[in-house]
Image: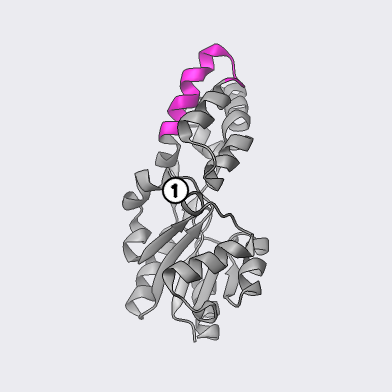
Amino acid sequence: MITNIVFDMGNVVLSYDPNYIIQHFTKDKDQQRLLVEAIFKSPEWLALDEGTLSKEGACSIMKTRVELQLQPLVKKVMDEWYLHLTPFKDIIELSKKLKEEGYTLYLLSNTSLSFYEYYENVEAFAYFKDFYISARHLLMKPDPAIFKDFCKRKQLNPTECFFIDDSQDNINSAKSIGMQGICFNGNYDNAQMIYDAIKKCS
């Protein structure tokens, strides 16, 4: 019986699009391209999610990839990028509905410690019991170890958990330890498919 609903964050609860985010910092197309490459597509961005590098350390390295005049903008992006994450309204409503029906909601996300700077402003998270962040535990999806550690720390039975992610690899990994799940990367105007899949497994 499914009693726990576990959400990924990027492109499930919130839209994560570096090309959209960077438009809020510069209108110059060449600068946008350079900054996306230097920041969001860098090894340091991944290291932040892994919890193996500080924001200050990452920022210092990222600055070396751009010309001097763009270096202050690198820091500004690193300090403010999360202000431009767009919530999916249907997921807010779904979260509320699931909690009202007695399910317990969790977040399990590959993300940096910057999460703790903005999570309280995410409306959907008001319905969540707890959050598991990759950088805090030094584990990353799709490694099955992250799902095992999540269940151990939250004292959950994997067979009672339903996982929602935009990556099929992550869903497959969750299923390998006994979770149910669905890959959700389609129509964000309609979260009914998630609800129906949960009910089918409950």
Image coordinates for residue 156, horizontal then vertical, percent? 46, 76
Give the magenta part as a residue range: 64-79
Q: Main secondary structure of the magenta part?
A: helix
Residue 143 quadrant: bottom right
Residue 76 lies within the magenta run: yes
Front-lying residue, 156 or 19: 156
- Is 48 one of the magenta-colored residues? no
Q: In the picture provided, is 123 more to the left or to the right than 21?
A: left
Rendering colour mode: one colour
Which residue is found at the position 53% from the left and 31% from the top? 58
Q: Quadrant of residue 80?
A: top left
Of residues 196 and 119, the one nearer the viewer is 119
Residue 35 x/y as whole percent: 57, 27
| SS for callout 1 | strand
Q: Residue at x 48, y 82 (%)?
A: 2
Across and down, in percent, residue 23 comes to: 51, 32
Q: Is residue 191 visible?
A: no
Nearer the observer, 74 or 132: 132
Q: Residue at x 57, y 25 (%)?
A: 61
Residue type highlighted by circle 1: Thr
Residue identified by numbered label 1: 86
Q: Is residue 89 shown to the viewer in this render?
A: yes
**Badge 1 density bin: few <14, some 14–19, many ≥20, Cα 10 Å:** some
**73 sits left or right of 141 in the view:** left
Q: Position of residue 54 (x, y in %)?
A: 48, 36
Q: Is residue 64 above or below residue 107?
A: above
Compared across the picture, whether 57 is left or right of 97 comes to right
